[in-house]
Image (tube, grey):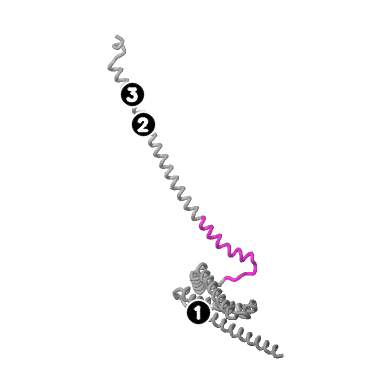
Amino acid sequence: MEESKVATQKEAVDNTCVKDSTENQINDATGEVSSQVSNTGSVCKPSEDTEARFNRLKLFDKVMQKSLEKLIETASFNRFASTYGPLYKKNPEKIVSIHKQFIEELQRTIQEDISRLIEEGRLELKLNELDKLERAAKNSADPAWRPSGVPEQDFCSFLMPYYQKQEAYMRQELKKIQAENAALAQKVQAGRESVAQTEHRISAAVDEWKASVIEFERLASSLCPVNVLDV
């Protein structure tokens, strides 16, 4: 009887210690999560050009903080200690230290992933684009687009502006190519005219040379008759 009573009291004390350690670990982890999320928000938060963008970043920080808190709760000390029950009974302080290191490493890894996601996803740029779209929607008098319920029509309405832009681009490029071809044709025509003029000048020079040769032969024959040369 006494041994069972002592065992029961020891087990109750162990459970109380586990519960206290768990609460301390959760409180410490939550405090560290809040501080790290706040630091991340201060680092990733851009200059407050608009209140809307600030609110979006603030909301993003809150969402990340809540997600981290939920994740830390799932990695509670009770679960950790129950997984390593024999080791906890032998050395509770060591298990507490290991769990604390595990939580810190988990937080650090998640914070690095979030920072990398913000950087690679260009969150600030996307929020700026979202602000522009929101302002454009407020200033536009046209009704906002709503799905018609017919996927084919919605798909066509989405693709038609793209194809129209592509068609306009192709027409513009075609005009450029046609203008370049016209300029090249003018250059070719000018080259042909230059070649024709050169050929005409050469032909005229040849005709003049032939005429001068004939005139020279005539003068030579008049100055030196053939019968005189025969004597």
- Type of amino acid at the residue the image marks with label 1: Ser
Q: Main secondary structure of the magenta part?
A: helix
Above/below status of 191 relative to 66: above
Report the residue at 40% width, 39% height from top: 193
Give the Cα distance between marks 2 and 1: 97 Å
Q: Which of pointers 2 and 1 lies earlier in the amino acid sequence?
A: 1
Q: Which of pointers 1 and 3 lies earlier in the amino acid sequence?
A: 1
Image location of residue 197, percent across then percent down: 38, 37
Residue ranking furthest to the top: 231
Q: Which of pointers 3 and 2 lies earlier in the amino acid sequence?
A: 2
Residue ranking furthest to the left: 223
Above/below status of 171 relative to 61: above
Residue at disc 2, secondary structure: helix
The residue identified by callout 1 is: 35
Residue at disc 3, secondary structure: helix
The residue identified by callout 2 is: 204
Of 76 and 122, nearer the camera is: 76
Are the residues flagged by discs 1 and 3 in contact, CB closer than 8 Å?
A: no
Marks 2 and 1: which is nearer the front?
1
- In the rendering, which numbered label is found on residue 213? 3
Mark 2, Cα crowd under 10 Å, few <14 / some 14-19 / many 20+, is: few
Report the residue at 34% width, 27% height from top: 209
Report the residue at 45% width, 49% height from top: 180
* Region of the chain picked out in magenta, as a range: 145-170
Residue 106, image quadrant? bottom right
